[in-house]
Amino acid sequence: MVLAARDRVSSEDEATRSLETLCRQYWPPLYAYVRQRGHAVHDAQDLTQSFFARLLERDWLSAADRERGRFRSFLLMAMKRFLANEWDRIRSEKRGGKIAFICLDMAMAEGMPIPDPKSVSGETLFDQRWALSLLEIVMKRLRFEYEAAERLAVYEELKPSLTTERGATNYETLAKALKMEPASARSAVHRLRKRFRELFREEVSATVNDPAEVDDEMHAVIAALGRL
């Protein structure tokens, strides 16, 4: 996505779609980081919007080198520099009406709890929100597959088993809800979990350049979620 977003040869529509996907995927962790730095809700919204506007207007993506680390690390460092160097300018340009904001779902920001700065660092919070965004993408893809197969009701019944410890699922109860035999319910749960792992690995793989980094990055996601 980074390459498509910054590639001057790619079509304008493709570049736009890639940029929109990047912005929607990464604004929650970046917003959380800005809030953790002590900025009020509306200031943090303006800063996050303005950061993405700068990212696009000034072609900061050209500095994203896939050989030099993960894209999320690049974005976090870019945000740190942005906050250090451009906050005063952003406030001035906002008053002058010069900032062209992009469309982000900032309504979500109001419901995003920000822990006490003493309990967790901004970097840790960024990683947690990034992991949650990745998890949300996987869950949406999984749900869409069941919906496309006209099995959405089955998915809703099976979904809790993704967070249930192994051995704790009551297959008798689940089988009754699904109107099938317990053995079939067990197989359905197994298929759901297997597909979730496949999609999870696929999404993580898309965020790294070297296939050898996938396992490490998956562990990083799981570790970030475990600190919630």
Image (spheres, helix red, strand yellow):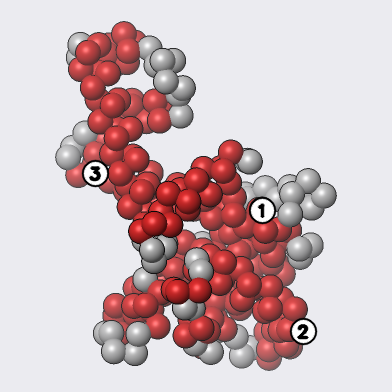
Q: Residue furthest top?
A: 172
Q: Earlier in the sequence, mark 2 or mark 3?
A: 2
* Residue under the image location 47 percent in, 53 percent down: 217
Q: Position of residue 192 (x, y in %)?
A: 29, 32
Q: How many labels, in total?
A: 3
SS for dot 1: helix
Q: Nearer the viewer, mark 1 or mark 3?
A: 1
Whether residue 121 sits left or right of residue 111 in the image: it is right
Q: Hey, which residue is sitting farthest front in the picture?
A: 212
Q: What is the spatial separation of the Cα atoms under label 2 and label 3, in whole angstroms?
A: 46 Å
Q: Which residue is mark 3?
A: 145
Query: Does the image show residue 153?
Result: no
- For the residue labelled by badge 2, is the local secondary structure a helix, a strand or a loop? helix
Could you tell me residue 151's position as x and y percent? 21, 34
Amino acid under disc 3? Glu
Find residue 109 and report its horizontal and vertical position in percent: 61, 57
Residue at point 33%, 52% (across, down)? 202
